[in-house]
Image: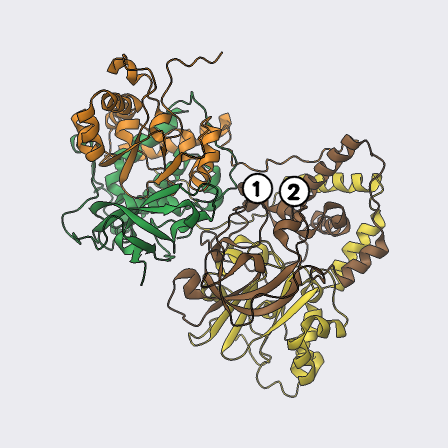
Chain colours: A brown, B yellow, C orange, D green
């Protein structure tokens, strides 16, 4: 969805407020939100789905909330949904219990998004010119608005990764090649003042088409 | 008669300091979540405390600084780091959630790399810890992709026109770490001393590594 | 124990009903402006009341409805209206601020026109009066350009797939007025009766003209 | 500037709240704001400049304010500026007085934006294919983001009009041809479901370039 979270290129938020001595957590509740979010993440589906919950927060709430407030809203939305499902299914007692050993393993070993199944052979090679598709899906996507319909160059091939646009909606991981794509600042913003500046963004193969098609 | 009308903050989304009352409200909401999760047997209080503890004490920019300092001192490690950052960082004992697929970007006198996540706030937790507030705020996320040089100036970093700026927007699960330039005249510094020069900001790319000979007076 | 956590309005920017206190605050701010302007001799109270009076009583969708009804009845007027709307509307005595450059768009069985101002809220005041709230709200301004058919459905207007939708975003000083289709079986209606069928919504393009034979039961 | 006011294509604001019986003014203060805004408009420069003041309202304030609240904020900002200038120049007593006859004439006759000076000969003709420039100015522009760098067709030539991008900033009216430009829904949004749908938007000649350049 084209939501306020997709804010690359907006210039209406003023200067960066940099505080050198900022604490990791300002309040105890922030630390708890972090701990609960990490601890319960396996309850609420893949990361892509959990990101999409944040994207659906109303614009004013999104902008006026701090980061951990948005996370708190996500937890509340997700738990409201989960309890509603459980009540409906009358499985009140059957909430999954989180195993600390498993969780600790995930924290230190991660949950990689690369896959050995799916499309393993990249269509594009480093140096290829591509154009991003101009798509405006109503659901989750990681094709930021500011790089839609723009021409760029394949800079790296990251291997085959789970595809957020389907994974977020329970439509399968649809694993496919992921690329780092380079765009010139001029292509994205029309600026000619710094002709050598570039922006790199990671894009899945389904977002791209060969330039001359 | 006063001729000053209602003042308006024209250009910022300021995450304002919360009042005591607001903090009490937020605390209450979090406690409700916590109580529910514990009562239903989903998590225990111990488990939550252990997780909080990991992120408070185990992860942080010191990990990244150790990686960078070693790369400065050990050319073969630097090569491995640039070739396969995930593996080279694992060598140092760091890895995990939000660091599954690492790429290291080398700054040089003519190339300056800077990292953002414009769509949310993706950040390499195992090497940098949890992200600072400004990294997650709209001002940084929206403007670094279009006006990187202006934003870097706000951090006190003025780049020459001849330097190529490379902005990396981490839209997938690949996480980027900047390898800053080693400060001049630090040939005799040991790795441990170099670690102290590597700030979080330098590894995001909004600053250079600390100059040990720089004095503010 | 309740398992309902804090609820959130996920998808709307609701311009909430203001509290008594907020209205008092707004009223006070406006009074301060007014007092200043009057004390400095910039405007008089009479002048402000005269202006308010013009917009309250003189301008409104009835003007536009008269233009449309005449176009339905008078083919040569309709031609003049489509050729040079500003002039043809002036013939009827309407014109002025926010109506300096008018264009009329004719709806047909296969073409449906709808008007917006995505960047602010430009609107043809002389023929439609002041814009309704929804026309100025983010939901309409942002979505009519990308999902016109969905938005029209929210107004109760379901268009066939075969109808061509034309969205007009008034980004300059040209103002657009939709000439809706004349309702069927109104051949015997006089101009005055037809005026009553022409709603503001029909002239913006989010509805059709009223069907005089339609009954809700 | 790329501000929240430029919201075409966002899908995060929910459904339209349509109230058939909405009054013209909800409260007396709204009517006063309208009257003051119209009455004093000649004090605060051209319409383009006054629009730009609205664009500079902070994002949260912009979104949470009703229309007349935004207008109130604009009046306050404009009067703060005007009084500051007057204090500096010590011309406290010399505020311009609004003449009702002149104002009434403007209300009923308008302040047209077409001009007989400037560029009178359009470069493009009806039917020509154009591409909009991809510009991201820090000041006022009426080239909405969602039509930047897109291909369209000249649909109408509106004559020569004052150019907002310069007029808003005291850089002259730079009068030039204004066009209604048609874009297919597919070109703008990539949707193929309604291939015949089109969007028309008024664009000045300086926003456009011939397609094959």
Residue pictured at 28% horizontal, 22% vertical:
C65
Residue C78 x %, y %: 21, 27
Question: CB atoms at circles 2 and 1 under 8 Å apart?
Answer: yes
Residue pictured at 70% horizontal, 35% vertical:
C5
- The secondary structure type at the circle numbered 2 is helix
**Residue D145 or B178: which is nearer the viewer?**
D145
Callout 1: residue from which chain?
A
Name which of mark 2 and mark 1 comes first in the sequence: 1
Residue position for label 2:
A73
**Residue C197 or B41: which is nearer the viewer?**
C197
C-alpha separation, residue under disc 2 versus residue under disc 1: 9 Å
Residue A193 x %, y %: 38, 68
Residue B118 x %, y %: 55, 56
**Is residue B10 among what the camera can see?**
no
**Residue C184 or D90: which is nearer the viewer?**
C184
Residue pictured at 62% horizontal, 69% vertical:
B177
**Residue C101 or C20: which is nearer the viewer?**
C101
Residue position for label 1:
A61
Question: Quick one: which residue is furthest to the left in this view?
Answer: D116
**Vertical position of residue B163 compared to residue A11: above or below:** below
Callout 2: residue from which chain?
A
**Is residue C57 among what the camera can see?**
yes
- The secondary structure type at the circle numbered 1 is helix
Q: Residues within 10 Å of mark 1 (few under 14, many from 20)?
A: some
The N terminus of chain B sits in image quarter: top left
């Amino acid at each position: 969805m084209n939501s306020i979270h997709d804010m690359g290129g907006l210039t209406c938020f003023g200067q960066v407020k940099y505080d050198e001595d900022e604490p990791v957590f300002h309040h105890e509740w922030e630390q708890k939100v972090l701990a609960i979010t990490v601890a319960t993440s396996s309850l609420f589906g893949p990361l892509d789905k959990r990101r999409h919950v944040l994207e659906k927060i109303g614009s004013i709430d999104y902008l006026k909330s701090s980061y951990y407030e948005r996370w708190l809203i996500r937890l509340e939305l997700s738990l409201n949904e989960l309890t509603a499902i459980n009540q409906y299914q009358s499985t009140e007692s059957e909430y999954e219990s989180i195993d600390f050993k498993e969780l600790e393993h995930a924290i230190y070993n991660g949950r990689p998004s690369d896959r050995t199944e799916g499309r393993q052979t990249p269509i594009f090679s480093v140096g290829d010119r591509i154009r991003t598709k101009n798509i405006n899906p109503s659901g989750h996507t990681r094709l930021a608005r500011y790089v839609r319909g723009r021409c760029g160059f394949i800079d790296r091939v990251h291997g085959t990764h789970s595809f957020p646009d389907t994974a977020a909606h329970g439509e399968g991981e649809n694993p496919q090649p992921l690329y780092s794509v380079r765009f010139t600042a001029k292509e994205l913003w029309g600026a000619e003042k710094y002709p050598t500046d570039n922006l790199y963004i990671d894009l899945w193969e389904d977002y791209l088409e060969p330039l001359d098609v | 008669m006063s001729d000053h009308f209602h003042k308006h903050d024209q250009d910022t989304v300021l995450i304002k300091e919360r009042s005591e009352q607001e903090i009490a409200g937020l605390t209450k909401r979090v406690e409700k979540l916590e109580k529910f999760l514990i009562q239903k047997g989903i998590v225990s209080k111990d488990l939550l405390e252990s997780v909080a503890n990991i992120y408070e004490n185990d992860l942080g920019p010191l990990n990244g600084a150790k990686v960078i300092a070693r790369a400065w001192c050990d050319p073969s490690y630097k090569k491995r780091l640039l070739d396969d950052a995930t593996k080279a960082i694992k060598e140092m004992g760091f890895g995990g959630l939000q660091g599954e697929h690492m790429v290291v970007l080398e700054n040089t006198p003519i190339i300056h790399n800077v990292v953002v996540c414009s769509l949310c706030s993706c950040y390499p937790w195992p090497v940098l810890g949890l992200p600072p507030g400004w990294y997650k705020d709209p001002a940084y996320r929206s403007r670094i992709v279009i006006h990187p040089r202006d934003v870097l100036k706000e951090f006190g970093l003025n780049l020459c026109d001849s330097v190529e700026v490379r902005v990396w927007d981490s839209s997938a699960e690949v996480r980027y770490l900047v390898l800053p330039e080693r400060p001049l005249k630090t040939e005799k510094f040991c790795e441990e001393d170099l670690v102290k020069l590597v700030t979080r900001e330098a590894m995001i790319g909004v600053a250079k590594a600390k100059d040990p000979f720089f004095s503010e007076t």
